[in-house]
Amino acid sequence: MTADAPRGVDAPPELVQLLTPEGERVEHPDYDIELTTEEVRSLYRDLVLVRRIDLEAVALQRQGELGLWASLLGQEAAQVGSGRALTDADMAFPTYREHGVAWCRDVDPVKLLGLFRGVNHGGWDPAEHNFHLYTIVIGSQTLHAVGYAMGIQRDSAEAATIVYFGDGATSQGDVNESFIWASVFNAPVVFFCQNNQWAISEPLEKQSRIPLYKRASGFGFPGVRVDGNDVFACLAVTRKALQNAREGQGPTLIEAFTYRMGAHTTSDDPTRYRVADELEAWKLKDPIERLKAYLFKNQLADQEFFDKVEAEADALGRDIRRRCLELPNPGPEALFQHVYTAPHALLDEEREQFFSYLAEFER
Amino acid sequence: MTTLTLAKAINEGLRRSMEDDPKVLVMGEDVGKLGGVFRVTDGLQKDFGEDRVIDTPLAESGIIGTAIGLALRGYRPVCEIQFDGFVFPSANQIITQLAKMPLRSLGALRLPVVVRIPCGGGIGAVEHHSESPEVYFTHTAGLRVVACSNPADAYTMIQDAIRSDDPIIFFEPKRRYWDKAEVDLAAAGMPIDRARVVRPGSSATLLAYGPMVKTCLEAANAAEEDGRDLEVIDLRSLNPLDMDVITESVQRTGRCVVVHEAPVFTGFGAELAARISEKCFYHLESPVLRVGGFSTPYPPSRLEEHYLPDLDKVLDAVDRSFAY
């Protein structure tokens, strides 16, 4: 591949796909899925709302209301498909881009915004949603997910963990260690790699000489590549992998072949390293458009439905914008809170000194 | 009272914690069948099973990272890092994850993980087996850092550490593993975050922790012949630091020498000297002096007697303190 050629545009033949970019339903020998009309419409609604949350967050950053945002644009199907495969008892470990999975786990989007606005480092209770905090150091959460899965084994619980990471993360030692741990302990964990083709500016070939899903075989567990822009396939493949994990068949690596349509974060400028043709080619594979086409063609939804979802998205956008702007700035006491769970003499002393110092300005 | 080595005292403490709380796990390289390279976990896997005493793959980041996951699921893992110099592959998990999860979750999460690290030199080991990496961890907010120096403390401190809901780096002085002492297995012990005056004295204060406590006690005994009555304080906890005991002592004696194996430059003694100068400025008869390693990597073992603080180096510093 030449340096400037569009990447990942020709779908690899081994890709599990149940819905083509044109919205045609296709069969796969190993993966099938039965969904009611209501379930399909619900998936569509998820995709649209998640994209709207993302769009609103990008706008908030551009207007100076967020310090940063990591857009999921283009990865909605990978996240909603896998997120909707989870049961309540399953536990998800995200990176910092899993806004769509957070949505599926009922985490208030404003809590995600709080992190990027700088009011806290993560404001939700992971146990309440079975959705762990965002992890920013690349790949670190993969080991947490495996450890958690080892806990599930010890509890003899009917559950699995899923851990999200990107193509770049597969170069991290922690990710490789997590593969080893999961393998030798047969841990109930699903490794969900969203290969969005880019790790900031570095294309996949800077991370790997082989397709990422093939890495799994070297560690002794199955790997599968799924069309990450096909919500049906992502749901079916993840569901099966989770069920295998819960049944004691150990880990699976899923490589969701997708595309980061936006910048790495709002601080990034992808025009410096990738060609415009690539984005145009991937727009034809858009996860939402193909589901909309499917719904239309099969008369599973009418214009009224689509209008209603759009209206809901608009209202959601307005709502999270309003509540984001209302997020209170933390007071200086928050500096010292939750560093330790029990009293800590040094911190108590520093807090006292700092408040005495602040009080001098109020005289 | 029972006579135990320091290694056996930790073993008994681990055993008791595992009996008291089924969520307590032990994990690390060779901790199961072998009982650890220092035998600190000897017999635990036989009695508590492979699910609770876990022989892990050989990867330190994996040990700490999966311990975090187990803690998130409600377990209380006690991780063994086989040697001090091997903690660095896990430094990312300790510093960026283990230390920061309670704050990141606004208090929703607790990570009761203990990281046991045999530390220090003096055993004639090869490279990376004799280091004193404590300040990397005392500098990391969110961690508690302690060091035991004797069997009785080791027995209660390991149990306290396991009961703590905060992550704790637990340093064990490997060259003292075979030192024996009387241990009261029914005793609760002094709280883990308190310093202890192990030898009362009036003419100068020696501050030490871990392996150097014994060295300072020996120095104090030798100094007695010169008519100097040295007080020795075992810090026990480095973070938090029990400044009250230190301040009371140094204000009384007016002189202080800090002793540790780690390099003096930006070592833990620097923090102690700075704090003592703040709290005891008008009581000091001389500057706080420090005895420790050189600003060199830990040397080959044939050189370690030159590198390590010993009785003579401590007494030399005491002489210099009195010469002011």
Image: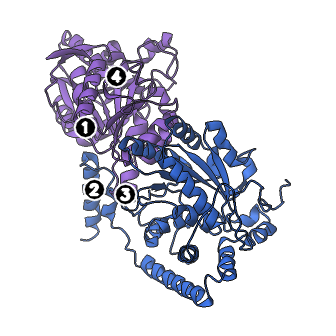
Chain colours: A blue, B purple
In this view of the protein, which residue sits in the foreground, B129 or A303?
A303
Label number found at residue B46: 4
Mark whose residue sits in front, 1 or 2: 1
Separation of residues labelled 3 and 1 (CA atoms): 22 Å
Which residue appears at 48% of the width and 80% of the height?
A321
Left or right, A107 with respect to A216, comes to left
Splitting the image into 4 quarters, where does residue B132 fall? Answer: top left
- For label 2, the SS is helix
Element at badge 4? helix
Q: Which residue is mark 2?
A: A351
In this image, B104 relative to A5: left or right? left
Q: Which residue is mark 3?
A: A127
Q: Are marks 3 and 2 in contact (CB under 8 Å)?
A: no
Mark 4 vs mark 3, foreground winner is 4
Residue type for callout 2: Arg
Circle 4/circle 3 CB separation < 8 Å: no
Element carrying mark 1: loop
Q: Are marks 2 and 4 in contact (CB under 8 Å)?
A: no
What is the CA distance from the residue labelled 4 to the residue labelled 3? 33 Å
Measure how far apart labels 1 and 4 are at the Cα level: 17 Å
Q: Quadrant of residue A201?
A: bottom right
Residue B285 seen anywhere in this rendered image of the structure = no
Q: Counting residues from the N terminus, which is met first, the one under dot 1 or under dot 4?
A: 1
Three-letter amino acid code at disc 4? Lys
Mark toward the viewer: 1 or 4: 4
x and y percent of residue A330 in the render?
36, 68
Between A139 and A181, the one nearer to me in the picture = A181
